[in-house]
Amino acid sequence: METQLDTNNSRSKWIGTSNRGFAVQAVEELRRLFTGLKFSYLMPAEVFMFDVPMAKEEALEIINRDMPMFLRHLQPVDHEIERAAVDGDQQDTEGQDEIASEDASNHVDLKALAQLLAEQYTFEAGEKVTVQVRKSEGIPMAYSVASIRETADRVLHEKIEAETVVRGADRIISIYVVEDMMFIGVSRPQENVSDWSGGAIRFRKEDGQVSRAKFKLLEAEYVFSLDFTQYRSAVDLGAAPGGWTSLLLERGLDVTAVDTGTMDPALMKNPKLKFIRKNASSVKLAEHGFDLMVCDMSWHPKQTAGLLKDLLHALKYGGTVIVTVKLMNKKAFQTVRDFVRILEPELQLQGAKQLFHNREELTLFLMKK
């Protein structure tokens, strides 16, 4: 049975996603934005459903005005399809892409999905559409996630005449599956916080990549709408073995890397790299020598903030700081407030986000006044 949700604009329903273990913080941020918010978990500590007493457009305006740090992804819920029961001996076929589409498409759930998409949605000529499908862990399914996506793609091509793409869509159809229900919503990419499915930004590991820490800085560049090629010189504090340094070198910057550890030998051959093998707290840097300062160290937040403050003389006015802040005691909001307070008024916070590639930490983007 398909249900269209409240059409009188009195409430809107959403699915929110955080990094695993941080849904409590994401919900708390949303509670501060919306009086009367109701929520329930779809996947413990990671994915949750919530509804608020206002229309989609108004809710989106509030969220975008004060973007939560721990909300990684947002999906509107416009329709719900009640799923047919699955016998206990039926196997979950997720990931088995070889399943025959013609067989899967006869399942009652997929028939209902196809009917809903054909009847409820229209797209403008030439619009590009991405279909993103997720499901809660461990639920029984008689068809694969790939079959859900194939069903939606088929309807988009045959009935709606929309062009389906993997990236660069004008609109996203989001489908989330739980044991007894399928939730469907359509949105613009910018309305989902992240245009990646579930906010899970995937970068391909490269041959010879120094470390996976590089992905954190790549994601920060993307999320904060930065372009590192526009910078000239950077200092990387706590650089070894060189994951962040390698990205900055690829972007063409002159990089000064500081660490007591050793850098990757391949990086040391780069003429644009200067390596200072010292503890970052004892290094001497020239005044106004850099327009970018990055730091990804496993220090206590107050120590990291103190280090940055001591070295701010080396950053040009208008320069950028990208830093990870470790959440050692899970008091996330107080940790960020204390961290920023130490650096004020010289640095002004531009953005704070727990990125997909963060773990027990947040990434902050600050600028020097």
Image: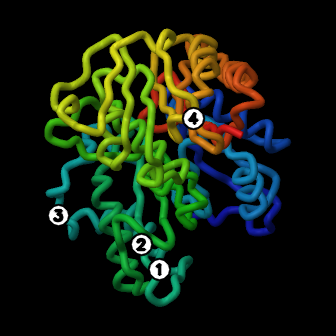
Give the residue displayed 35% in from the left and 61% down from the top.
Answer: 148
In the rendered structure, which amino acid carries the disc numbered 4?
His
Mark 2: which secondary structure?
Answer: helix
Q: Is residue 25 above or below residue 74?
A: above
In this view, the residue farthest toward the right is 35
| Disc on the earlier residue, 3 or 2 | 3
Horizontally, residue 254 falls left or right of residue 303, namely: left
Q: CA distance from mark 4 to mark 2?
A: 60 Å
Q: CA distance from mark 1 to mark 2?
A: 6 Å
Mark 4: which secondary structure?
Answer: loop
User: Residue 167, located in which quarter of the rendered image?
Assistant: bottom left
| Disc on the earlier residue, 3 or 4 | 3
Per the image, the residue denoted by label 2 is: 114
Mark 3: which secondary structure?
Answer: loop
In the rendered structure, which amino acid carries the disc numbered 2?
Ala
Tally the numbered discs.
4
Tell me whether the residue at label 1 lies in contact with that at label 3, contact meaning CB atoms closer than 8 angstroms: no
In the rendered structure, which amino acid carries the disc numbered 1?
Ala
Horizontally, residue 65 falls left or right of residue 199, namely: right
Per the image, the residue denoted by label 4 is: 288
Q: Is residue 205 above or below residue 282?
A: below
| Disc on the earlier residue, 4 or 1 | 1
Per the image, the residue denoted by label 3 is: 100
Circle number at residue 118: 1
Q: CA distance from mark 3 to mark 2?
A: 17 Å
Q: Residue 176 at what x, y percent from top left?
A: 47, 52
Tell me whether the residue at label 1 lies in contact with that at label 2, contact meaning CB atoms closer than 8 angstroms: yes
In this view, the residue farthest toward the bottom is 125
In the rendered structure, which amino acid carries the disc numbered 3?
Ala
Circle number at residue 331: none
Nearer to us: label 4 or label 2:
4
